[in-house]
């Protein structure tokens, strides 16, 4: 795709709103926040513009997703990182069977969905009723502080492909484990779960 074709596919109105939002972040003191989590104001603004839903509301417009993410990341790299990851996580969740994804997308606002990889201590056991029991630690979950749901990712064992299990963030205990020098505010913490 040529640069001209790319820009023809960008939703200029939405990108303008994202640019205004990013400029507002730069021109005001954001709320006081922990250095290892996104400012609450940023997440609220992203929700108000429904930007976490971009992958599903504009699935054919990757140029718009790319441009909006770039604008957000220019204002706050950590917020840009979390936004683009959560857009992708919503796309993964949208591939679930209807019965599995219905709880995720049934709220009044579009959910923020994080993911996390199973640590070697995490266990998943199939139950006779078709459900699963999950215990253990999960690592590297960007945006977990503001997420509504987290997709727990298991790989290996008897399953050749990754298995994802959706879990409400109300059921996780976040460990303040993210101390990276770059993208510190992405809040890519680990957490434990037992259900």
Image (cartoon, helix red, strand yellow):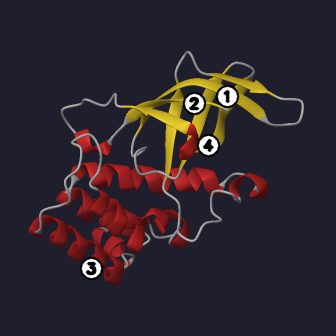
In the figure, is residue 98 to the left or right of 77? right
Tag 4–tag 1 contact (CB < 8 Å) = yes
The residues tagged by marks 2 and 3 sit, at their Cα atoms, a distance apart of: 40 Å
All told, the count of numbered labels is: 4
Residue sitting at x 45%, y 53%: 86
Q: Residues within 10 Å of mark 3 (few under 14, many from 20)?
A: few
Indicate which disc, 4 or 1, sits on the residue closer to the N terminus.
1
Q: Which mark is residue 134?
A: 1
Between label 1 and label 3, give the one nearer the viewer.
1
Q: Kindly identify which numbered label has been placed on residue 16.
A: 3
Whether residue 183 appears in this view of the structure is: no
Check residue 193 in the rendering and tell me which mark sits there, or answer none.
2
Q: CA distance from mark 4 to mark 1?
A: 10 Å
Between disc 2 and disc 1, whose residue precedes? 1
Residue 73: x %, y % from top left: 24, 56
Label 1 or label 3, whichever comes before in sequence order = 3
């Amino acid at each position: 795709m040529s640069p001209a074709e790319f820009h023809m596919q960008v939703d200029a109105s939405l990108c303008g709103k994202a640019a205004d939002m990013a400029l507002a972040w730069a021109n005001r003191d954001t709320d006081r926040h922990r250095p290892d989590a996104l400012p609450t104001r940023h997440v609220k603004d992203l929700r108000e513009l429904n930007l976490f839903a971009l992958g599903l509301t504009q699935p054919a417009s990757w140029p718009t997703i790319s441009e909006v993410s770039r604008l957000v990341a220019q204002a706050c790299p950590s917020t840009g990182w979390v936004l683009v990851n959560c857009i992708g996580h919503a796309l993964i969740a949208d591939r679930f069977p209807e019965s599995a994804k219905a709880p995720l997308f049934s709220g009044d606002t579009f959910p923020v969905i994080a993911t996390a990889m199973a640590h070697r201590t995490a266990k998943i056991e199939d139950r006779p009723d078709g459900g699963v029991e999950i215990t253990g630690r999960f690592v590297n979950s960007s945006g977990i502080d503001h997420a509504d749901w987290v997709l727990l990712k298991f790989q290996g064992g008897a399953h050749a492909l990754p298995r994802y299990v959706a879990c409400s963030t109300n059921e996780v205990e976040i460990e303040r484990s993210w101390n990276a020098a770059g993208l510190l505010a992405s809040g890519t913490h680990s957490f434990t779960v037992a259900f």
